[in-house]
Image: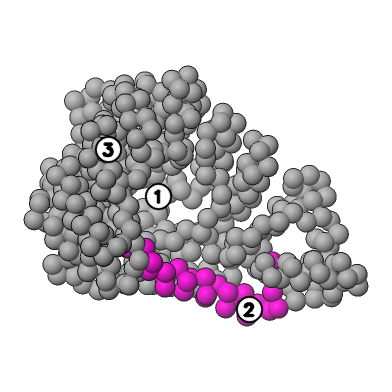
Amino acid sequence: MQPSQFTVTVSDFPETGKHLIYNTITQAQVIIDDTLKSVMDTLPALPEKEEARTAVAQLKKMGFLTDSENDDSLALESHFKKIWDDTSVLRATVLTTYSCNFECVYCVEEGVKKAVFMDQKMAQEAVEYIEGKFAEHGSRSISVYFYGGEPLLNITAIRTVANGLHEFSLAHNVPLTFGFNTNGVLLTPEVIAELKPLGLTWATITIDGPRDVHDRKRPFKNGKGSFDAIIANLKAIDGLTHLDINVNFDQSNVGQIPALLDFLKEADQSSKIGKLVFTPITKTPKDREGLRPATETDCSFMTLETAQQLIALRRLAMEKGYNVDVGVHARACEMVLRQASIIIDPYGDLYGCSALAGRKEFSHGSFREEQKDAFKGMELWRRCAGCAFAPLCGDGCPFGSFIRFGDPLALNCARETMDYFVGESLKLSYLKKKRKI
């Protein structure tokens, strides 16, 4: 018997002589003392005391200990197979338009933004395609994510898809939920009142800082600021649906985010936010254009500095009373690891990653003429099978690999970053559960 390669240790936490151990496959985490840590470190020699033997048996049951490296390999294989085989929820992303009423200084869709809108016929065909995939995968529920551009610029397509799937859900007793990522200026009480009976359960709005910072980074197309319009809508839709706030950050605004958190508290909005999410801004496919294929660029998701900033923002938000998801979760890439996941753009073209939508080289046809998806089901995780963090980052991120190397299949490893991020996230998660932060 030996410690599993997927057991991560945060030493001397929550106090000296105690250690938080976490298994990246089973997601189990417990606190052990120096004595039990010493027992784990001296395996395969078993302890003499019955109490210690009982503890060892329990740790093995939770995945912290394993009989052999081969058992670890089998556990990792089973982990990814379980993700692939889980078709219980059909996840569908529908891009209603590539158009936007904002002119953000950063935009993952720069280069593909166009005044193209999914028409009613296309939206109805999207409904039929989703229903067909639901049957093909034998799913039990449907979750739809409306995206853009700004999805609410094409409320007609949202209505068509939502109504069509709502009728399907009633006829076949299928649970249906949907939501959208929106800039917030078109999200009104009237929109929510219309869509909620059809399955609307959530929305995410992006705010990138206090007024001057946000207006600089996310202005309207005419250059005017959008902050006041968003805040007015936040107050108007209070309590009508679950609402998360996303804050995109980079070096230009990370220092001003504390002021945003204070503003939202003073405006009596902090307690009405379902969850506060911080997302690092990274380069886009547009930034790669004109570069040599092998040119390496930065991918902010993978840097130690970004991880440190993210942990600091989460801790600060928690201290100010916001609900922040600080847990460590296995990332299951929709493009590669999940078979019951589809993305449809306004043209009816199919993609595996919404961040790469609109770039024809990544399309696998359309729902009218679907082709084999070259990425779906690739077992890229096998090249990382010896890493403790393989169950968490899986195959890496094809989008991030494309941004960094120009090749979505390149290995985009950041072991140092993961080591820091997982350890600090486990600390925050523990403190949150113990109500110490």
User: Magenta region: which residues?
Assistant: 64-91
The residue at 23%/55% (across/down) is 166
Q: Earlier in the sequence, mark 1 or mark 3?
A: 3
Q: Is residue 266 left or right of residue 290?
A: right
Majority secondary structure of the magenta segment?
A: helix
Crowd band around label 3 with a 10 angstrom C-alpha radius: few (<14), some (14–19), many (20+): some
On screen, residue 260 versus residue 353, left or right, reads right
Percent x, y of residue 81? 46, 74
- The label on residue 71 is 2
Question: SS for tag 3?
Answer: helix
Pointer 3 residue: 192
Q: Amino acid at mark 2?
A: Asp
Q: Position of residue 266 (x, y in %)?
A: 47, 19
Q: As shown in the figure, which amino acid type bears the numbered disc 1?
A: Thr
In the rendered view, would you say 9 is above or below 53? above
Q: CA distance from mark 1 to mark 3?
A: 41 Å
Indicate left or right for 355 with 312 as reference. Answer: left
User: Residue 87 or 177: which is nearer the viewer?
Assistant: 177
Q: Is residue 360 visible?
A: no
Q: Secondary structure at mark 1?
A: loop
Q: Which mark is residue 105?
A: none
Q: Is residue 118 above or below residue 363?
A: above
Q: Quadrant of the N terminus?
A: bottom right
The residue at 79%/51% (across/down) is 18
Looking at the picture, which amino acid does disc 3 mark? Ile
Mark sitting earlier along the chain (2/3):
2
User: In which image quadrant can residue 30 be found?
Assistant: bottom right
Q: Nearer the viewer, mark 2 or mark 3?
A: 3
The span from disc 2 to disc 3 (Cα, nearest Å) is 50 Å
Instruction: Give the residue number, with chain letter if any, for mark 1.
Output: 297
Callout 2–callout 3 Cβ contact below 8 Å: no
